[in-house]
Image (spheres, coloured by chain):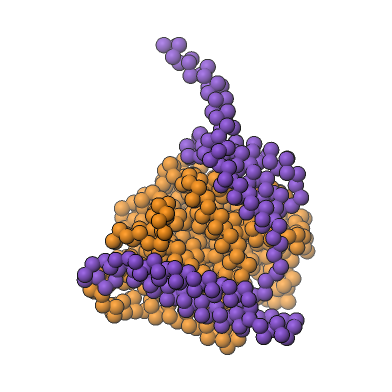
Chain colours: A purple, B orange
Amino acid sequence: MSEPMAQSNERRRPDRAALFVAVGLLALAALVAWDASRLGAGGAYARVGPQTIPFAIAICLGGLSIWTVFAAFRHDFPQRARQEWAPVLWIVGGLLAQIALIKFTGFSIATGVLFAMTARGLGRVSLPLALLSGILISALIWFVFGRLLQLTLPVGPIEQLIVQGAELIAAPFKSAPGSAV
Amino acid sequence: MDTFGLLLQGLAVAAQPINLLYALIGVTLGTAVGVLPGIGPATTVALLLPVTYKLDPAGSLIMFAGIYYGGMYGGSTTSILLNTPGESASIVTALEGNKMAKAGRGGPALATAAIGSFVAGLIATIALAFLAPWVVKLALAFGPREYFALMVLAFVTVSAAFGDSALRGLTSLFIGLTLGIVGIDLQTGQARMNFGVPDLLDGIEITTLAVAMFAIGETLYVAAQGKRTPETVEPVRGSLWMSAKDWARSWKPWLRGTVIGFPIGAMPAGGAEIGTFFSYAAEKKLSKHPEEFGKGAIEGVAGPEAANNASAAGTLVPLLTLGLPTSATAAIMLAGFQQYGLQPGPLLFTSNPQLVWGLIASLLIANLMLLVLNLPLIGLWVRLLTIPKPWLYAGILLFATLGTMGANPSLVELGMLLVFGLMGFGMRVFGFPIAPVVVGLILGPMAEQQLRRALAISQGDVTVLVASPISATLLAIAVLALIVPLLLRAWGRGRILSEVAADND
């Protein structure tokens, strides 16, 4: 499992990133235990209350953290290829932009931005083209899922335009049965 | 009524035009996501859960099962033509299938995969129909402690028994269990791990977690690898049809694959991929042409493809009869049942036989549809492989956020999607498996309920857990499934286990 390393002094050093994982697990264990410690017991007779399982999980997480430390020293973690961060930042930025925008601009624009930034993260695409196609696809999807399948999706200027447009088109059909009576 | 009569009744339900339509939508979507890399059946069902909320339960469950079966078919296409498995159960298919495609025998490889999947799906679905009533009878004798023991066994097999590291599998599982604590405790009404955030009182949505971990985590991971792997789609050259010799070499592996795959799926032993590895090993051993293995032996495609479809049907046995999911897709299908207030288990067979038998019967129909969809229309699916990566993943993220907003239109939900997506990315980089997190989240709270019920009955006496022969046996098997692989790895025999890694779906 542990690949032989190029340099012998690197071999003696523990796997730093794996140690971070161990610290993270320990922190999670502490968090779970702290949260469980403020829970009341389930009743006088119940020896097993809402806090029992969280404590058990916290203990196991602590054990796994120690085990991970050993694994870090033995280099039991698979070697990691170098990750490219720029594409990841584009995509995470896209998701953050969607969260920030969606209340103000509605579903289509916010999701269009996410679409464009994700596409940009994965390859060389023209941003304006990606943005335009993203907004158009999102608007179409909003109509299908938001209007026809009645999901609650955030409304913005584009969505209002679609609704008004749809009403304009539907208006003559709606008045027709009324006048026929 | 006997099984046969119930199955016929189920066929009547499944043959209703609207249910046929749902099955057709399901298998078409399933094939598409099986073909596409980066999105598997688990993600697709998770994305569709909120969308189908207002539809009829039988119809949407038929659709979900169609997606599951379709994903198993579609995955083979990607493996054979692209050498990149579309989902984890098709990794083995890529070994021989891609070699066959490179040698200009892609057509027979696709055909043996599709027909093998059909044969296996048919036999395994009938086996499911006949086995289910027996398991239901057995399950009626189960009390809380037996259910708890069964869930412990499922935890161990999903996380620690297979794969290349028990440590990382267990860590994933406990992360899932930790996420499962979040929300209101059902017995005392106290809020746990919500840190004052009201949105967390309902717990963490399984759909949000699955979509984030699978779709967003995978997208980030693919993006972070840069342009390292140039991919070439092998064109399908020559005849699609199998020669008489291909048939002669395929039919036994199909049947053996079915026999190997079904029980592995039916036992709480993880996803469909495990059976495919065993089947491949068996075919390699039994083949009259062992020299062809590694260079494109048709047995190496026929066996594993049959095994993975048989496993998919097998997974439905514990899901329908015990309410026990043993793969990520099954876990999300369980969430699908719960969305309609249905709890799979022995009771469902008596309270809602129309639905259960309709679902089982629809699998037979879905199987037939898949054969038609996959053989003559193969060219259409191959086209999907040529969608450029940026547009493909941008589309996946669009649908991922749509599904999450559809389930719960709140910014906290979108924030969780991002956080868990980053977590899924990090876990992929470090080689942590994803499926145990999803199974832990849905099964953890259920196991806790059963444990607390069992201990409430015994007034806190823990020995009650091993006092019944059934639960004692199950717990003993769980302990063995934890310790034996650890010893095997310590003795340097772990390679076979890491080859049998249960990965995504």
User: Is residue B172 or residue B123 the one in the foreground?
Assistant: B172
Q: Residue at x 58, y 37 (%)?
A: A105
Residue A45 x %, y %: 21, 71
Residue B88 x %, y %: 60, 64
Quadrant containing the C terminus of chain A is: top left
Horizontal side of residue B129 vs A132, given as left or right: left
Q: Residue at x 48, y 46 (%)?
A: B410
| Quadrant in the rendering for residue A72 | bottom right
User: Is residue B151 or residue A68 the one in the foreground?
Assistant: A68
Q: Residue at x 64, y 56 (%)?
A: B219
Horizontal side of residue B5 vs A165, given as left or right: left
Residue B337 x %, y %: 41, 53
Horizontal side of residue A156 vs A85, given as left or right: left
Residue B19 visible in rendering: yes
In the image as oriented, which residue stretches furthest toward the left?
A45
**Position above or below: A111 against B442:** above
Q: Residue at x 44, y 42 (%)?
A: B55
| Quadrant in the rendering for residue A158 | top right
User: Is residue A156 or residue B363 the one in the foreground?
Assistant: A156
Quadrant containing the N terminus of chain A is: bottom right
| Quadrant in the rendering for residue B231 | bottom right
Residue A129 x %, y %: 73, 40
